[in-house]
Image (cartoon, coloured by chain):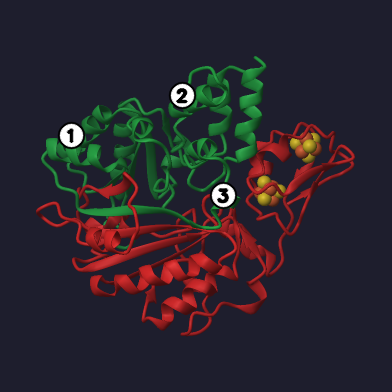
Chain colours: A green, B red
Amino acid sequence: MTHSLHRTGKINDLKSDYIILAMLAAGINDKYPDAKQKLLRVAEILNQNNPVNIIPKPAWKISPVITATFIDIEMVKNVIQTLIQEDLGVSIVISGLISEIQEAVKETGLKMHTIHLSLGTFGRKELLPSEEILEITTMCGHHCVSPQSVKYYVELIKSGKISVENAAKKLSKPCVCGIFNPTRAIALLNKLSGIFS
Amino acid sequence: MEIKADLCIGCGQCVIICPVQAIKLIDNIAVIDKTLCVECSICKRNADCLVNAIRSRRLKWPRVIRSPFSDVISTHKLTGIPGRGTEEMKTNDVTNRFGVDEIGFSIEIGRPGVGTHLGNIELFTTKLTSIGVNFERESPVSALLIDDSGHIKKDIKEERVLSAIIEFKVPLNKAILVLQAIKQIEKTIDTVFTVGVISQVMKNGAIPILDLLTQQGFSVRPNAKVNIGLGKV
Ligand code: SF4
Ligand code: SF4
C-alpha cells in the first residue's frame, strides 16, 4: 500500500497536506491481547487533532491500518507528542513534505527511522491527464477518483450549479481510506475553475 | 460489473465516475466495455445510480483476478490487507524488513490511474530475476509468478487491472542494476508506472541511496513517507 506516496503538486500546496498512518506488524505486535485497543487509541488521538479526513469510524475496528489527513504540520506535531506520551508502540508513518516532517520529528525529539522516497512516474506519460487534474486525483492513491469527474465538477462550479465545497466533498467520496484532502481539493478546484488563480 | 440496460435512464453518473473510462452512453444507455473494465466496483459504490442498474456479477477465472488488483475494498487473500501492497516500510521499526545497507523498491504498474494488463508484470519480473532479485513473498504479485524466471500464468496476461505493485529489496550495491533496468523497461512499456525507494535513515540523518539516485539521473520528489520509529515489538 504505497497509496499516499505519489501525490503530486507544488511545494506550497503540499505544505497543507499530511497523512498519518498507524499500523501494527502482522504476527509480531498485533498478536498481543491489547493490540486492537492500542490501534483504536491511535484512531482517537488522530480524530481529536482536527483531521480534515479520516478512515470512517465503522472501519476503525476492522481495518489493520488507521489513516487520517491533516492540513497543518502543527497538528501533526501535536499528534506525535501525544503518541510519544502514551507510548502505545504502534508504528506511525507520516506522509508529506520531507523537509517539514524532518523538522517535526526533530522538534519532538525523534529521528526518522525509514523513508519511502518517490521517484515519480515513468513510461507513457502522454496517457496521463493534465498536471492540475493529477494534483487532485493522486490524493486518492488507489486512483478511485476519475479525471473526468474533476472536469465535470469544474464545469458545474463554473456554471454556479455546485459550490466548490460540495464539489470537493463529492470528489472525496470514492476514497475509502480517508486520505483524500478535501481542503486542498477546494483550493485546487478554485484554481481550476478560475475563481482564484 | 454489468449494467441492466432495461433499467438505465442514461443519467451518465457512472460514466463520470469510472476511473478508466470503461463506460459510455450509447443511445442514452450506459454500456460497459468489458475489456477496459478493471472490476473496481467504484461505479456500483459511488455513482448513486437512482434505478439500481449497476450490478456485480460473479466473476469466473481468469477475470476474477481483476478485482483484488483494482477494488480497494477487496482484500488479497495473501496479504490480509485491503489494497494492492504489503506492510513494506510501514512497520519497519518493528520488523526490520529493510535493514541497514538494504534498499526496497515498490514499482506500481498502471499508476497513476491509467491501468495495465497483467502481462506487463513480466517485463519487470523477468528482467529483475535475471539480475538476482528476490520478490517480497507476501506481495500479491509474487503469488502470480509460476517459475524462478519471473513468468506469470499465461491465462491472466490479458486481464486488465487498475495497478499491480512489484515489491522487493536488494543490497545497496545492487540498486544500480535495478535503476538501470527501470530505465530500459520505461522505453518499451505501454502504460505508466511509479517507482518508490525505501531506505533506513542513518543515525546522522543520511539516506545512503540519494547519491546513487542523483548519479543515475533520477530525481526525488519533495514528499515521501516517513516511519518515525514509534513502533515497538
Ligand atoms: S448511473 Fe445508473 S441510470 Fe445513470 S447512466 Fe449509470 S447505470 Fe444508467
Ligand atoms: S467496475 Fe470500475 S472499471 Fe468497471 S465499469 Fe465500474 S467503475 Fe468502471
Give the SS element for disc 2: helix
Query: Is there any visible trace of residue B136 in the rendered image?
Result: no
**Height in image: A52 above or below A93?**
above
Chain letter of disc 2? A
Question: Residue A33 placed where, x, y %?
Answer: 29, 52
Pointer 3 residue Cβ closer than 8 Å to ligand 2:
no
Please tell me which residue lies in front, B39 or B188. Answer: B188
- Tell me the distance, in whole angstroms, between the alpha carbons under discs 1 and 2: 29 Å
Question: Residue A132 placed where, x, y %?
Answer: 51, 35
Q: Which corner quadrant holds the N terminus of chain A?
A: bottom left
Looking at the image, is mark 1 or mark 2 nearer the viewer?
2
- Tell me the distance, in whole angstroms, between the alpha carbons under discs 2 and 3: 22 Å
Q: Which residue is mark 1?
A: A81
Q: Residues within 10 Å of mark 2 (few under 14, many from 20)?
A: some
- Tell me the distance, in whole angstroms, between the alpha carbons under discs 1 and 3: 36 Å
Dot 1 or dot 2: first in sequence order is 1
Query: Is there any visible trace of residue B149 in the rendered image?
Result: yes
Q: Quadrant of residue A8?
A: top left
Under mark 2, the amino acid is Ala
